[in-house]
Structures are given as C-alpha cells and as structure tokens.
Image: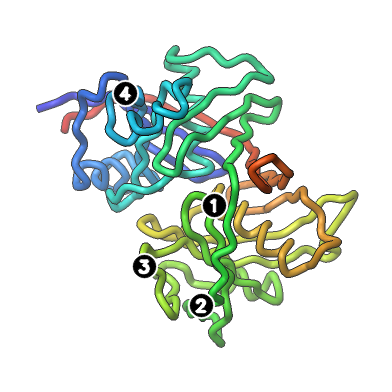
Amino acid sequence: MTTLRFTKGHGTGNDFVLVSDPEGEIDLSPVQRAGLADRRFGVGGDGVIRAVRSHRIPEGRELLEDAPDAEWFMDYSNADGSLSEMCGNGIRVFVRFLVEQGHIELAPGASVAIGTRAGVIDVHRIAEGFAADLGRWRLDGGEPLVRARDLPVARPGLGINVGNPHVVVALASDDELEALDLSTAPVLDPPPAAGANVEFVVPADPLVVDGIGRIRMRVHERGSGETLSCGTGAVAAALAVRYWAGSAAPNEWRVTVPGGVLGVRMFAAEDGERVALSGPAELVFEGELTL
C-alpha cells in the first residue's frame, strides 16, 4: 500500500485535491482519482491535480520542445477520474500550491509558465490572487439546443472553446437561473463529440457599470456535475455575452458565480485576441491517506 500526501484547495468554491509528484512516481488510475474526489468516501473535490515536472510526463515533454521554461505540468482530472485539458480555477490553485510546497518562487507581479493538456498557460501573481493568460479562444458556434431540468423550453447555446469546450445559454432572469436543477447533465442536441461544460448566464441590469460588464452564471461541468465555480466557464460566458451584446460591449467583465466573483479580460495580441482570468486561490488543509 502507498501513503499519499495531499492538499485540499479551492478557487471561488471550485475545489481540488492536489498531490505533489515532482518525479512522476505516483501512477494514479482513473478509479483512484475518482476515489480521491469522492465527497463521501474520499477527500472530496471537483477534480484532482497532480503536480509533476513536465519532463516526467509525455504530454509535458512535447510542450518543452517549444516552451522550455514550462518546468511544471498540471495533470488535471475531473471528479469522475477522466483526464481534462485544463481548469481555469484549478491552475490558479495549482500555482499557489507550487509556491507553498517550495517548488517555485513567485513574487507579486511575476509570472510562471505552466504546462497543461491545453498548452502552456502563463500565470501572474497579483494582489487579489492570480491571473492566468488562457491564450486564444475560438468561437465554435453551432447553436446546439440545450435542455435542462426545470427549464421549460429548450434554448439555443453558443459553442466557445477556451482550451476546453463550452456551450453558453442565455436566460431571461435571475429566477430562471435559480430554478434550474443541474443535478443531472443538460442534454445538448446535437451532442458535442468530446462533451462540453454548459453555462447558464443572466446579464445584470444595467449590463455595464464603469466600463465593466457584469453577469451571473451557473455551470454543469462534464465529468464533475454542477460546481460552485468554473474558471474557463466564466471566460466562455463573458465572451458569449459580449458576442451577443455587439461591438460596443466592453472587454472587461465581472462574473458572479455561486462561489464568488471572477474577473475576465479580453486583450489584443500578435497572434489574435486572448483572454485572461483572475481570482483568488486558497489552500484549505493537508493530510495523508493510504491507497
């Protein structure tokens, strides 16, 4: 049997079990990852994150060819044990974990490159926590019909990819948002080949205050169910509302989720428009268990 040390952390209530494995010596199976994330029989979390040096994992070695400074790789899996591309809240908690474990030093204002299955993500340390440059985004479009419990009529969604796939659905009121039952996965027609996170969003009234857009959101994450927050989902929701609002819409947004508030910023770069996500990252407790 193996004794596993872990840390529990969260970003606006989106919680994770983190494991330090610099040399890639811990081989967690999907069943073990799901067991760690189980809220009744394990530690409990929306996902499991293993911190491993990039050269110790095949996906990381590929990234090092073009990004030799990405020393650390965020090996992320959903609560059901399935591997995922990355996690916007998780990557902030991951960097906080690296700092607290003594794996890296990161002064306020400095940044670190992190390898993920969605590519290399630059994470900056800021006063309010951390900000992650999630890179270029893609409008998948498609407008699949979305059905959810206690949503009387199916609504069209907008497909947006931010390193992982999302479908964003606009609702008419806070009452509609609160009434949703997301204990089961929304049904998408046609269903995306790789699945998708589904965000339900309500614009604030007024939508823009002091040049900043404001929206509320709930989310059902593939492989994890409803979560208190989803970082890339907040980005996708802000992008979708800006798209619907038109050219006069702002490039800075505040997204209120059940677990708190996240910041989203869109900015121009040489390779196209990029998006950044900012918010807190907290480590809650440490422990150990026997696998």
| Alpha carbon distance from label 2 to label 1 | 18 Å
Among the 4 quarters of the image, the one containing residue 271: top right
Viewer-closest of 22 and 15: 22
Query: Residue 111 placed where, x, y %?
Result: 60, 23
**Residue at mark 1:** 162
| Alpha carbon distance from label 1 to label 3 | 16 Å
Is mark 2 in CB contact (under 8 Å) with mark 1? Answer: no
**Residue at mark 4:** 55
Q: Which class describes the residues within 10 Å of circle 1: few (<14), some (14-19), or many (20+)?
A: many
**Residue at mark 2:** 144
First in sequence, mark 4 or 3: give its number: 4
| Alpha carbon distance from label 4 to label 3 | 30 Å
**Residue at mark 3:** 193
First in sequence, mark 2 or 1: give its number: 2
Residue at 44% across, 63% down: 196
Give the residue type that dot 4 points to.
His
| Alpha carbon distance from label 2 to label 4 | 39 Å
Q: Which class describes the residues within 10 Å of circle 3: few (<14), some (14-19), or many (20+)?
A: few
Q: Quadrant location of the N terminus?
A: top left
Query: Residue 44 placed where, x, y %?
Result: 35, 43
Q: Is residue 238 above or below residue 155?
A: above
Q: In this view, does 281 lie above or below 86?
A: above
